[in-house]
Image (spheres, rainbow, N blue to C red):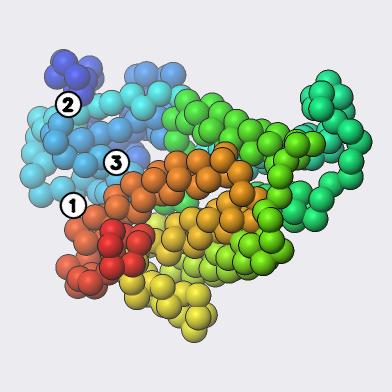
Amino acid sequence: MKIEIANGKTGKTLLTVDVVKTDSILDVKKKHIKEKSYLYPSRISYKLSLKDKTLSEDVKIGDIETLTDGSVFYFKDLGPQIGWATVFIAEYTGPIFAYLIFYFSNTCSWIYPDNEGAPHTTVQNLACACYVGHYIKRVLETIFIHRFSKATMPIGNLFKNCTYYWGFSSMISYFINHPLYTMPSTETQVYVGLSIYLFGELGNLSTHLAFKNMRPAGTKTRVIPMPNGNPFCALFNLVSCPNYTYEVISWIGFTVLTQTFFSGLFTLVGGGQMLQWALGKHRNYKKEFKDYPKNRKAMIPFIA
């Protein structure tokens, strides 16, 4: 059987490859690469039509019912790729150093001209522990917990993501550690904020561990997320992505604790982005599983 590989934008045939029913899409990509040596599998996307989803690499030619001799695969070059784990480690390591630079520069007159050499306050110390602790947790989760459904992403995401996380971290730390920083007026607010933050962090970690256990190592298995014996995971009864819910809770707590504009802005912007991701994942779950719980929302219980 012959398959035509056509440009996804112009429809122009680029090459023709011979395939058998036992070949996978990955095998087709390897044959494509022999003709175009600058390509590699994760950079290649094939669709049966411009409106269809990208064909998964493990799909067999014989399993595609509509495929006949002379059928067309529409090709898209996804551009240079980079590993998800690499991007995550880079975007999460940067905030640790960005935050600590300003934390340890509180006596540096060329960064803080108004500096009077005052030691850090309790809130500044707590904020540092919370912020740096969050990103150390994220790095460790990337290494030991997360199981990615896709191996790579466009390399441009590395620069976009790092700019976002590193930039916000610098602004948040600069103002929290500023000599003129004004801490919350009551200790009650500080410890309420800290409690909310810790609650969110524990919930976030618990749901990440739950997601890990739902996908056996080395597989792309997808199941309906369900609660386990962990009380934090009971939130799976209400939302598809409780990990995002708990993360937003963490940043709300951090904002209450620090009472700064950029902490609140980071919470708002990050929460909006996570809601978009959650809505997309929620739609995919409902399409994939016909018995998916109907009353479950994406990220915000009973709302969205």
Residue 80 percent location from the top left of the image: 46, 24
Horizontal side of residue 38 vs 175, given as left or right: left
Task: Tell which circle, 2 or 1, labels the residue nearer the N-terminal end.
Answer: 2
- Name the foreground residue: 218 vs 129: 129
User: Which element is circle 2 on?
Assistant: strand
- Name the foreground residue: 283 vs 4: 283
Task: Tell which circle, 2 or 3, labels the residue nearer the N-terminal end.
Answer: 2
The residue under the point 19% across, 31% down is 73
Horizontal side of residue 174 vs 28, given as left or right: right
> 10 Å neighbourhood of mark 1: few (<14), some, or many (≥20)?
few
Residue farthest front in this picture:
185
Label 3 near label 2: C-beta < 8 Å?
no
Label 3 near label 1: C-beta < 8 Å?
no
Quarter of the image where one finds residue 284:
bottom left
Disc 3 residue type (three-letter):
Ile
Structural distance between the alpha carbons of marks 1 and 3? 11 Å
Residue 230 percent location from the top left of the image: 52, 80
Residue 221 percent location from the top left of the image: 37, 62
User: Which element is circle 1 on?
Assistant: helix
Q: Which mark is residue 4?
A: 2
Quarter of the picture containing the N terminus is: top left
Structural distance between the alpha carbons of marks 2 and 1? 18 Å
Residue 97 in view: no
Structural distance between the alpha carbons of marks 2 and 3? 13 Å
Disc 1 residue type (three-letter):
Asp
Number of callouts: 3
Quarter of the picture containing the C terminus is: bottom left
Disc 2 residue type (three-letter):
Glu
Is residue 182 shown above or below 191? above
Quarter of the image where one finds residue 93:
top right
The residue under the point 68% across, 56% down is 185
Q: Which mark is residue 25?
A: 3
